[in-house]
Image (cartoon, helix red, strand yellow):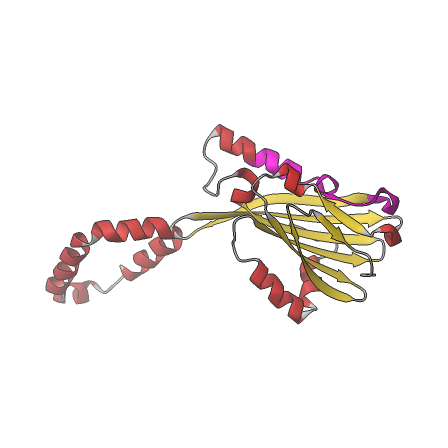
Amino acid sequence: MKHTLSVVALLAACPALADETRQMEAHEHGVAALNIAFDGETVAIEFMAPGADIVGFEYEAETEEDRAAVDEAVATLARPLDLFVLPDAAACSVTQASAELEGDIDHDHDHEHAADEGHGDHDHDHEHDEAAAHDHEHDHEHGEEHAEHDHEEGATHSEFHAEYTLTCGAPEALDQITFAYFDMFENARELEIQVITASGAQAFEVERDAPTLDLQGLF
């Protein structure tokens, strides 16, 4: 994903805020992260949310219905001004927008680790056949328990990630953001927001029942 004005780079320039970002990125259902950087007429936004918040599931999309839900969500997330409503007087327009679904599966790592352990010396393995047989019997007795654990470890954790760049003709009119995001995604409960301006950085929390962030006094 390309950056026009990298929010990530701006966060890296502020160590304290970067620490808060890492904590905020913990995978918590119902809670999404939003980083916003204001630089003159340019507004850069980075958004991250668990897959369950956006499409209602986190497993890999396999059915046509699941894939359609992901495609629709990506298309919706690619329209930032529909999600994060700015004052009309600010005259903001989108100059760049991108969204995608990211995920990781832990069981692949476990599989590779097991395969690496299998590359022992042939003669060495021959000398320890009895010990290996004992280990095999032990593994067989506890196979069901281990399989269940591996299944849990192998769960997929998906996350939607989007980045936007806006240009605002009258940035002085940016006095609030209204989050229509909550209306579009029923599983969304909270936004953890970090705002960077020329005067410094601040963190906020916006919840579904009070979906407006007051920006007055930040510039």
In the image shown, does 40 or 112 lie closer to the viewer? 40
88 inside magenta stretch: yes
Q: Residue furthest top?
A: 64
Q: Residue furthest bottom?
A: 15
On the rendered image, what quadrant is the C terminus found in?
Answer: bottom right
The number of callouts visible is: 0
Q: Looking at the image, which residue is at 89% across and 50% down?
A: 170
Residue 33 appears left or right of 5:
left
Vertical position of residue 134 compared to residue 163: above or below: below
Residue 136 placed where, x, y %?
16, 57
Q: Looking at the image, which residue is at 78% across and 43% down?
A: 94
Vertical position of residue 102 compared to residue 201: above or below: above
Residue 143 placed where, x, y %?
21, 51
Residue 80 placed where, x, y %?
72, 43
In the image shown, does 57 or 162 lie closer to the viewer? 57
The majority secondary structure of the magenta stretch comes to: helix
Residue 100 placed where, x, y %?
60, 44
Q: Looking at the image, which residue is at 17% across and 65% down?
A: 123
In the image shown, does 87 or 142 lie closer to the viewer? 87
Magenta residue span: 70-92
In the image shown, does 192 or 1 lie closer to the viewer? 192
